[in-house]
Image (spheres, rainbow, N blue to C red):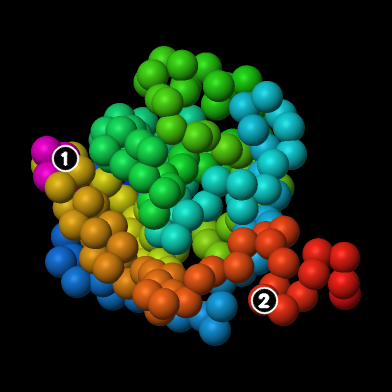
Amino acid sequence: MRSILGFALFAATTGVGEFWPVEHRPELRPVEHRAQHPDFGKITLFSLEEQTVSLSAYAAPVTVLVLWAVWCKPCLEELPYVEQLHQLYLGDRDVAILAISIDLRPEMVKAEVETLGLSMPVLIDADSNLRKAFSLSGLVPTLLYILPDFEMLRESGFNRAKADQFVADKRETIELARARIVRESKPPPNKKRVKHGDAKPGASRGSR
């Protein structure tokens, strides 16, 4: 009996053969609020080509990260829906959707990416840099929304029974997050912006 219970607990925490339900939340409910975002430039990951890359090269005002692993069955079921979401926001400068593998072997990740036909950016957190920066455990699948006003929303699990609602539900959350982006204010109509390289009024180009 103990061995059965032990396996059940292992499956529930690692994703082996299990699907965890995720309740849809129409309003953003932050799991953490920080005075500022972690420095994306200091969070390094690996590409599928085993090159070191910075998260800042991929991030946007609204960044959505899906943490997954090749051994996680719910992850492999969820990723095609995340890919659909990525296609909806392809070319959108406000939103970035990334798949972050927690695996240690890039060749296995690359093979799974090819099998699933993923076109979204896929990075590897082999050194746990990202998980440490955001205080995340190794629980997968996990969706992490990094919002423009420094809040983070985390959802763990994949509900197969509501898979057909996945894209619509996540899109609603993303659009609520997008509404929080503070746009750059437009200059007054009579005030001309000084472009880089232009001389300031009353100053010659040769003066300092």
Question: Seen in the image, is 145 located left or right of residue 45?
Answer: left
Going by the numbered disc 2, the residue's amino acid type is Pro
Q: Which SS class for mark 1?
A: helix
Quadrant for residue 144, please give it: bottom left
- Residue 23's mark? none
Who's the residue at 32% across and 42% down the image?
89
Quadrant that contains the C terminus? bottom right
Q: Residue furthest bottom?
A: 35
Q: Secondary structure at mark 2?
A: loop
Query: Which mark is drawn over residue 163?
Result: 1
Q: Look at 28% across and 57% down and name the residue there.
A: 174
Please state which of residues 185 and 208 is positioned toward the viewer in this rendering. 208
Location of residue 187 (image quadrant) = bottom left
Instruction: Describe residue 51's horizontal placement relative to residue 14 as left or right.
Output: right
> Which is nearer the eye, 39 or 162?
39
Q: Which residue is mark 2?
A: 201
Q: Which residues are magenta?
A: 162-166
Q: Nearer the viewer, mark 1 or mark 2?
A: 2
Q: Amino acid at mark 1?
A: Ala
Residue drawn at 31 percent across, 51 percent down: 157
